[in-house]
Image (cartoon, rainbow, N blue to C red):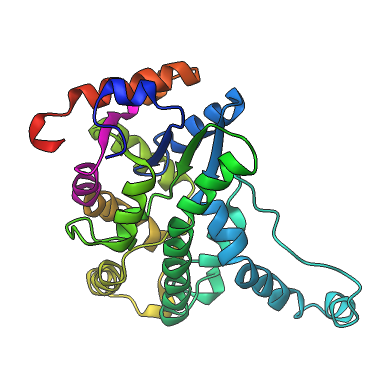
Amino acid sequence: MLYNSPQDWRDAEEKRVLLFGMSGLGKTHVSNLLRDDGGWFHYSIDYRIGTRHMGEHIADNAKRHAMQVPFLRELLMTDSIYIGSNITFNNLAPLSTYLGKPGDPAKGGLSFEDYMIRQEQHRVAEIASLLDTERFAQRAVTLYGYPHFVCDSGGSICEVVNPEDPEDEVLNALEQTTLLVWIKGDDAHTEQLVRRFDRAPKPMYYEPGFLRQAWQDYLTSNEVAPDAVDPDAFVRWTYARALAHRQPRYAAMAKRGVTVSADEVAAVKTAEDFETLIADALARRTPATT
Protein backbone atom coordinates (compact mmCIF):
# COMPACT_ATOMS: atom_id res chain seq x y z
CA MET A 1 0.00 0.00 0.00
CA LEU A 2 1.05 3.61 -0.43
CA TYR A 3 0.60 4.25 3.29
CA ASN A 4 1.41 1.49 5.77
CA SER A 5 0.62 3.42 8.93
CA PRO A 6 -1.39 6.40 10.13
CA GLN A 7 1.85 8.37 10.38
CA ASP A 8 2.80 7.55 6.77
CA TRP A 9 -0.58 8.92 5.72
CA ARG A 10 -0.41 12.08 7.82
CA ASP A 11 3.16 12.82 6.70
CA ALA A 12 2.44 12.34 2.98
CA GLU A 13 2.72 15.58 1.02
CA GLU A 14 0.57 14.04 -1.73
CA LYS A 15 -2.39 12.00 -0.48
CA ARG A 16 -4.10 9.77 -3.04
CA VAL A 17 -7.19 7.66 -2.41
CA LEU A 18 -9.72 5.70 -4.43
CA LEU A 19 -13.19 5.38 -2.90
CA PHE A 20 -15.25 2.32 -3.79
CA GLY A 21 -18.51 0.70 -2.71
CA MET A 22 -22.18 0.69 -3.64
CA SER A 23 -23.59 3.85 -5.20
CA GLY A 24 -25.39 5.94 -2.62
CA LEU A 25 -23.03 5.44 0.33
CA GLY A 26 -21.15 8.73 0.05
CA LYS A 27 -18.34 8.40 -2.51
CA THR A 28 -19.34 11.43 -4.58
CA HIS A 29 -20.46 13.42 -1.54
CA VAL A 30 -17.05 13.09 0.11
CA SER A 31 -15.23 13.69 -3.18
CA ASN A 32 -17.18 16.92 -3.70
CA LEU A 33 -16.39 17.97 -0.13
CA LEU A 34 -12.68 17.36 -0.63
CA ARG A 35 -12.69 19.21 -3.96
CA ASP A 36 -14.51 22.17 -2.43
CA ASP A 37 -11.91 22.29 0.34
CA GLY A 38 -9.48 23.41 -2.35
CA GLY A 39 -6.61 20.98 -1.92
CA TRP A 40 -8.03 17.88 -3.60
CA PHE A 41 -8.44 16.98 -7.27
CA HIS A 42 -11.69 15.04 -7.88
CA TYR A 43 -11.44 12.38 -10.59
CA SER A 44 -14.85 10.84 -11.31
CA ILE A 45 -14.75 7.47 -13.08
CA ASP A 46 -18.40 7.70 -14.19
CA TYR A 47 -17.82 11.19 -15.60
CA ARG A 48 -14.74 9.98 -17.48
CA ILE A 49 -16.72 7.04 -18.87
CA GLY A 50 -19.57 9.27 -20.02
CA THR A 51 -17.38 11.92 -21.62
CA ARG A 52 -14.12 10.47 -22.94
CA HIS A 53 -14.93 6.81 -23.48
CA MET A 54 -18.68 6.65 -24.19
CA GLY A 55 -19.50 10.21 -25.15
CA GLU A 56 -19.81 9.37 -28.85
CA HIS A 57 -22.11 6.41 -28.17
CA ILE A 58 -24.34 8.63 -26.02
CA ALA A 59 -24.47 11.46 -28.56
CA ASP A 60 -25.12 9.10 -31.49
CA ASN A 61 -28.01 7.50 -29.63
CA ALA A 62 -29.59 10.91 -29.03
CA LYS A 63 -29.11 11.78 -32.70
CA ARG A 64 -30.66 8.46 -33.72
CA HIS A 65 -33.83 9.37 -31.85
CA ALA A 66 -33.78 12.92 -33.18
CA MET A 67 -33.49 11.65 -36.76
CA GLN A 68 -36.93 10.06 -36.35
CA VAL A 69 -38.45 13.55 -36.03
CA PRO A 70 -38.68 15.21 -39.48
CA PHE A 71 -38.14 18.72 -38.11
CA LEU A 72 -34.98 17.71 -36.19
CA ARG A 73 -33.75 15.44 -38.99
CA GLU A 74 -33.70 18.38 -41.40
CA LEU A 75 -31.69 20.49 -38.97
CA LEU A 76 -29.24 17.68 -38.23
CA MET A 77 -28.70 16.88 -41.89
CA THR A 78 -27.76 20.50 -42.55
CA ASP A 79 -25.57 20.80 -39.45
CA SER A 80 -27.93 23.47 -38.14
CA ILE A 81 -28.17 22.10 -34.62
CA TYR A 82 -25.82 20.35 -32.25
CA ILE A 83 -26.81 17.43 -30.04
CA GLY A 84 -24.62 16.36 -27.14
CA SER A 85 -24.88 15.21 -23.54
CA ASN A 86 -24.56 17.60 -20.61
CA ILE A 87 -23.16 15.05 -18.20
CA THR A 88 -21.73 16.32 -14.89
CA PHE A 89 -20.24 14.78 -11.75
CA ASN A 90 -23.65 14.98 -10.11
CA ASN A 91 -25.84 14.26 -13.13
CA LEU A 92 -24.97 11.02 -14.89
CA ALA A 93 -28.37 10.64 -16.54
CA PRO A 94 -27.00 10.69 -20.13
CA LEU A 95 -24.84 7.65 -19.33
CA SER A 96 -27.49 5.64 -17.48
CA THR A 97 -30.12 6.48 -20.11
CA TYR A 98 -27.83 5.19 -22.84
CA LEU A 99 -27.19 1.93 -20.97
CA GLY A 100 -30.93 1.39 -20.92
CA LYS A 101 -32.99 -1.53 -19.65
CA PRO A 102 -33.99 -4.75 -21.44
CA GLY A 103 -37.59 -5.67 -22.11
CA ASP A 104 -40.78 -4.47 -23.73
CA PRO A 105 -39.94 -1.88 -26.43
CA ALA A 106 -43.32 -0.22 -25.84
CA LYS A 107 -42.05 0.63 -22.36
CA GLY A 108 -38.68 1.84 -23.57
CA GLY A 109 -36.94 -1.52 -23.29
CA LEU A 110 -34.06 -2.75 -25.44
CA SER A 111 -33.66 -6.21 -26.86
CA PHE A 112 -31.49 -8.20 -24.47
CA GLU A 113 -28.66 -8.56 -26.99
CA ASP A 114 -28.61 -4.81 -27.74
CA TYR A 115 -28.61 -4.25 -23.98
CA MET A 116 -25.61 -6.57 -23.61
CA ILE A 117 -23.75 -4.73 -26.38
CA ARG A 118 -24.10 -1.51 -24.40
CA GLN A 119 -23.07 -3.30 -21.21
CA GLU A 120 -19.88 -4.46 -22.96
CA GLN A 121 -19.19 -0.93 -24.15
CA HIS A 122 -19.45 0.21 -20.54
CA ARG A 123 -17.12 -2.56 -19.33
CA VAL A 124 -14.42 -1.53 -21.79
CA ALA A 125 -14.93 2.16 -20.95
CA GLU A 126 -14.80 1.58 -17.20
CA ILE A 127 -11.54 -0.36 -17.40
CA ALA A 128 -10.02 2.35 -19.59
CA SER A 129 -11.19 5.06 -17.18
CA LEU A 130 -9.74 3.21 -14.20
CA LEU A 131 -6.42 2.80 -15.99
CA ASP A 132 -6.49 6.56 -16.64
CA THR A 133 -6.31 7.14 -12.88
CA GLU A 134 -2.52 7.30 -12.65
CA ARG A 135 -2.30 9.87 -15.46
CA PHE A 136 -4.92 12.07 -13.82
CA ALA A 137 -3.22 11.76 -10.43
CA GLN A 138 -0.02 13.05 -12.05
CA ARG A 139 -1.88 15.81 -13.94
CA ALA A 140 -3.51 16.92 -10.71
CA VAL A 141 -0.08 17.88 -9.40
CA THR A 142 1.89 18.87 -12.48
CA LEU A 143 -0.85 20.70 -14.39
CA TYR A 144 -3.27 21.99 -11.77
CA GLY A 145 -1.13 22.11 -8.65
CA TYR A 146 -3.41 20.03 -6.43
CA PRO A 147 -1.40 18.24 -3.72
CA HIS A 148 -4.07 15.59 -3.07
CA PHE A 149 -6.17 13.32 -5.28
CA VAL A 150 -9.44 11.43 -4.82
CA CYS A 151 -10.73 8.91 -7.35
CA ASP A 152 -14.52 8.61 -7.12
CA SER A 153 -15.15 5.15 -8.60
CA GLY A 154 -18.42 3.71 -9.84
CA GLY A 155 -20.36 1.08 -7.94
CA SER A 156 -19.55 -1.43 -10.66
CA ILE A 157 -15.77 -1.33 -10.17
CA CYS A 158 -15.91 -4.77 -8.53
CA GLU A 159 -17.57 -6.17 -11.68
CA VAL A 160 -14.74 -5.22 -14.07
CA VAL A 161 -11.83 -6.52 -11.98
CA ASN A 162 -11.03 -9.92 -10.49
CA PRO A 163 -10.60 -9.17 -6.77
CA GLU A 164 -9.26 -12.66 -6.08
CA ASP A 165 -6.48 -12.43 -8.68
CA PRO A 166 -3.25 -10.96 -7.23
CA GLU A 167 -2.13 -10.26 -10.81
CA ASP A 168 -5.25 -8.32 -11.85
CA GLU A 169 -3.91 -5.55 -14.09
CA VAL A 170 -6.42 -2.89 -13.09
CA LEU A 171 -6.25 -3.46 -9.34
CA ASN A 172 -2.46 -3.56 -9.41
CA ALA A 173 -2.35 -0.25 -11.28
CA LEU A 174 -4.82 1.35 -8.86
CA GLU A 175 -3.02 0.02 -5.78
CA GLN A 176 0.26 1.50 -6.97
CA THR A 177 -1.35 4.90 -7.46
CA THR A 178 -3.90 5.22 -4.65
CA LEU A 179 -4.98 3.88 -1.28
CA LEU A 180 -8.10 1.77 -1.88
CA VAL A 181 -10.88 2.75 0.53
CA TRP A 182 -14.03 0.63 0.82
CA ILE A 183 -17.09 2.51 2.06
CA LYS A 184 -18.99 -0.39 3.63
CA GLY A 185 -22.70 -0.30 4.36
CA ASP A 186 -24.61 -2.42 6.86
CA ASP A 187 -28.00 -4.14 6.55
CA ALA A 188 -29.82 -0.89 7.28
CA HIS A 189 -27.95 0.87 4.47
CA THR A 190 -28.76 -1.99 2.12
CA GLU A 191 -32.47 -1.71 2.89
CA GLN A 192 -32.29 2.04 2.33
CA LEU A 193 -30.52 1.60 -1.03
CA VAL A 194 -33.12 -0.94 -2.17
CA ARG A 195 -35.98 1.40 -1.21
CA ARG A 196 -34.30 4.30 -3.02
CA PHE A 197 -33.73 2.22 -6.12
CA ASP A 198 -37.30 0.92 -6.02
CA ARG A 199 -38.58 4.51 -6.16
CA ALA A 200 -36.37 5.42 -9.11
CA PRO A 201 -34.86 2.36 -10.85
CA LYS A 202 -31.91 3.27 -13.07
CA PRO A 203 -29.73 1.35 -15.51
CA MET A 204 -26.48 -0.05 -14.15
CA TYR A 205 -23.55 -2.17 -15.29
CA TYR A 206 -23.28 -5.80 -14.15
CA GLU A 207 -20.80 -8.60 -14.79
CA PRO A 208 -22.00 -10.46 -17.96
CA GLY A 209 -22.30 -13.92 -16.42
CA PHE A 210 -24.31 -12.59 -13.48
CA LEU A 211 -26.56 -10.56 -15.79
CA ARG A 212 -27.30 -13.36 -18.25
CA GLN A 213 -28.18 -15.69 -15.38
CA ALA A 214 -30.40 -13.03 -13.81
CA TRP A 215 -32.21 -12.53 -17.13
CA GLN A 216 -32.87 -16.24 -17.57
CA ASP A 217 -33.99 -16.63 -13.96
CA TYR A 218 -36.35 -13.67 -14.31
CA LEU A 219 -37.92 -15.01 -17.52
CA THR A 220 -38.38 -18.45 -15.98
CA SER A 221 -39.71 -17.41 -12.59
CA ASN A 222 -42.15 -14.90 -14.08
CA GLU A 223 -43.08 -17.03 -17.11
CA VAL A 224 -42.69 -14.03 -19.40
CA ALA A 225 -41.35 -13.60 -22.94
CA PRO A 226 -38.26 -11.39 -23.41
CA ASP A 227 -40.17 -8.70 -25.31
CA ALA A 228 -42.91 -8.61 -22.66
CA VAL A 229 -40.62 -7.93 -19.67
CA ASP A 230 -41.34 -4.72 -17.79
CA PRO A 231 -37.88 -3.01 -17.93
CA ASP A 232 -38.26 -1.31 -14.57
CA ALA A 233 -39.47 -4.49 -12.90
CA PHE A 234 -36.43 -6.40 -14.18
CA VAL A 235 -33.84 -3.85 -13.02
CA ARG A 236 -35.53 -3.59 -9.61
CA TRP A 237 -35.40 -7.38 -9.25
CA THR A 238 -31.80 -7.51 -10.42
CA TYR A 239 -30.60 -4.70 -8.16
CA ALA A 240 -31.46 -6.56 -4.96
CA ARG A 241 -29.52 -9.59 -6.19
CA ALA A 242 -26.60 -7.38 -7.23
CA LEU A 243 -26.12 -6.03 -3.71
CA ALA A 244 -25.51 -9.54 -2.41
CA HIS A 245 -23.38 -10.40 -5.46
CA ARG A 246 -21.09 -7.42 -4.99
CA GLN A 247 -20.45 -7.55 -1.25
CA PRO A 248 -17.85 -10.37 -1.29
CA ARG A 249 -16.16 -8.80 -4.27
CA TYR A 250 -15.83 -5.46 -2.44
CA ALA A 251 -14.56 -7.30 0.64
CA ALA A 252 -11.86 -9.02 -1.42
CA MET A 253 -10.80 -5.68 -2.90
CA ALA A 254 -10.63 -4.17 0.59
CA LYS A 255 -7.82 -6.58 1.49
CA ARG A 256 -5.63 -4.36 -0.65
CA GLY A 257 -6.59 -1.23 1.27
CA VAL A 258 -8.72 -0.05 4.18
CA THR A 259 -12.38 -0.14 5.16
CA VAL A 260 -14.54 2.64 6.57
CA SER A 261 -18.23 2.49 7.39
CA ALA A 262 -20.89 4.50 5.59
CA ASP A 263 -21.84 6.03 8.96
CA GLU A 264 -18.25 7.19 9.48
CA VAL A 265 -18.26 8.76 6.03
CA ALA A 266 -21.58 10.50 6.71
CA ALA A 267 -19.96 12.18 9.72
CA VAL A 268 -17.16 13.72 7.61
CA LYS A 269 -17.65 17.48 7.31
CA THR A 270 -14.17 18.72 6.39
CA ALA A 271 -11.03 17.53 4.63
CA GLU A 272 -9.38 17.30 8.03
CA ASP A 273 -12.17 14.96 9.18
CA PHE A 274 -11.51 12.78 6.16
CA GLU A 275 -7.77 12.65 6.78
CA THR A 276 -8.46 11.58 10.38
CA LEU A 277 -10.91 8.93 9.16
CA ILE A 278 -8.29 7.37 6.89
CA ALA A 279 -5.63 7.51 9.61
CA ASP A 280 -8.00 5.68 11.96
CA ALA A 281 -8.78 3.08 9.27
CA LEU A 282 -5.05 2.44 8.76
CA ALA A 283 -4.63 2.04 12.52
CA ARG A 284 -7.36 -0.63 12.54
CA ARG A 285 -5.55 -2.86 10.07
CA THR A 286 -4.09 -6.00 11.64
CA PRO A 287 -0.48 -7.09 11.02
CA ALA A 288 -1.78 -9.97 8.88
CA THR A 289 -3.27 -7.57 6.34
CA THR A 290 -0.58 -4.93 6.15
**Do we see residue 290 in this rendering?**
yes
**Between 185 and 216, the one nearer to me in the picture:** 185
Task: Considering the whole magenta stretch, tell me its main secondary structure.
Answer: helix
Asked which quadrant contains residue 216, the reply is bottom left
Taking 9 as reference, is 205 above or below it?
Answer: below
Taking 120 as reference, is 45 above or below it?
Answer: above
Taking 241 as reference, is 261 above or below it?
Answer: above
Q: List x then y, in percent, for residue 200.
A: 49, 48
**Between 241 and 103, the one nearer to me in the picture:** 241
Asked which quadrant contains residue 268, the reply is top left
**Between 105 and 286, the one nearer to me in the picture:** 286
Q: List x then y, in percent, for residue 159.
A: 31, 60
| Quadrant location, the C terminus | top left
Q: Residue at x 46, y 32 (%)?
A: 14
Q: Which residue is drawn at 64% across and 71% down?
A: 56
Q: In the image, which residues are magenta?
A: 247-264
Q: List x then y, in percent, for residue 108.
A: 55, 69
In the image, is residue 160 part of the stretch drawn in magenta?
A: no
**Do we see residue 90 in this rendering?**
no
| Quadrant location, the N terminus | top left
Q: Which residue is drawn at 39% across and 35% down?
A: 25
Taking 251 as reference, is 214 above or below it?
Answer: below
In the image, is residue 263 part of the stretch drawn in magenta?
A: yes
Q: Residue at x 44, y 70 (%)?
A: 124
Looking at the image, residue 224 sits to the left or right of residue 140; the answer is left
Q: List x then y, in percent, for residue 82.
A: 83, 67
Figure disc tally: 0
